[in-house]
Image (spheres, grey):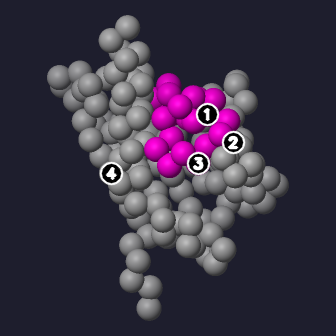
Amino acid sequence: MEDTTRIVSAERLVAAPAEVLFELIADPARQPEWDGNDNLAEAAPGQRVHAVGEVFSMRTTSDKVRENHVVEFEEGRRIAWCPASPGAAPAGHLWRWELLPQRDGQTLVRHTYDWTHLADPARIERARANTSAGLRASIDRLAELAETIADG
C-alpha cells in the first residue's frame, strides 16, 4: 500500500504584487533565476505563457529537455503545467502556482507539486524527493527577486 503523500505544497506571503510575481513564473526564461531545486538550467526567451494548451521547453541541469504542457491558466493568478519528454505525453505530474492578492499589497503565493497520476517507476523516486521545503525554497527565491523588482 502506498503511504506517500503525492501532493506537496508550500505557501507564504510575499511583499510584491501578484502581477510582478506572475511575470516571473509565466516567463520560462526567468524560471532558472528562482528555481529552489536548482534543477532548471535554461529556457529560450520568447516562450511567455498566455493560455492553456501552450507548451514551453526547458533544459534541466542534467541536460535533459522537458516540454511543459500548460493545463491551468488564469492571467496574474494561476498557472500549472505537466512536464514531458520531447514528443511524449506528460508523465503524470504537475507543477502549480497560485497567487492570491491581499488587501495590503502583498500576495499569498502557493506552490504545489502533484504526482498523483505519475506511474513511471523511474520517475517516482525523484518525485518523492520533492518536499514542501524545496517548494518553499522556490517561493523564497521568487519572493526575493519579485520584491527587488517591486521596490524598483
Relative side of 105 to 75, left or right? left
Q: Residues within 10 Å of mark 4 (few under 14, many from 20)?
A: some
Read off the residue under disc 2. 58
Q: Give the magenta-colored segment's residue range.
A: 22-42
Decide if residue 62 is in sight here: yes
Q: Residue furthest right?
A: 87
Task: Tell me the quadrant of the picture where the N terminus can be found.
Answer: bottom left
Which amino acid is tagged 4?
Ala
| Marks 1 and 2 close (CB-CB < 8 Å) | yes
Q: Amino acid at mark 2?
A: Met
Amino acid type assigned to the residue bearing label 3 in the image: Asn
Classify mark 3: residues with Cα within 10 Å, few (<14), some (14-19) or many (20+). Answer: few
Q: Residue furthest bottom?
A: 1
Query: Which quadrant is the C terminus positioned in?
Result: top left
The secondary structure type at the circle numbered 2 is strand
Q: Is residue 89 left or right of residue 133?
A: right
**Which one is earlier in the sequence, the residue at label 1 or at label 3?**
1
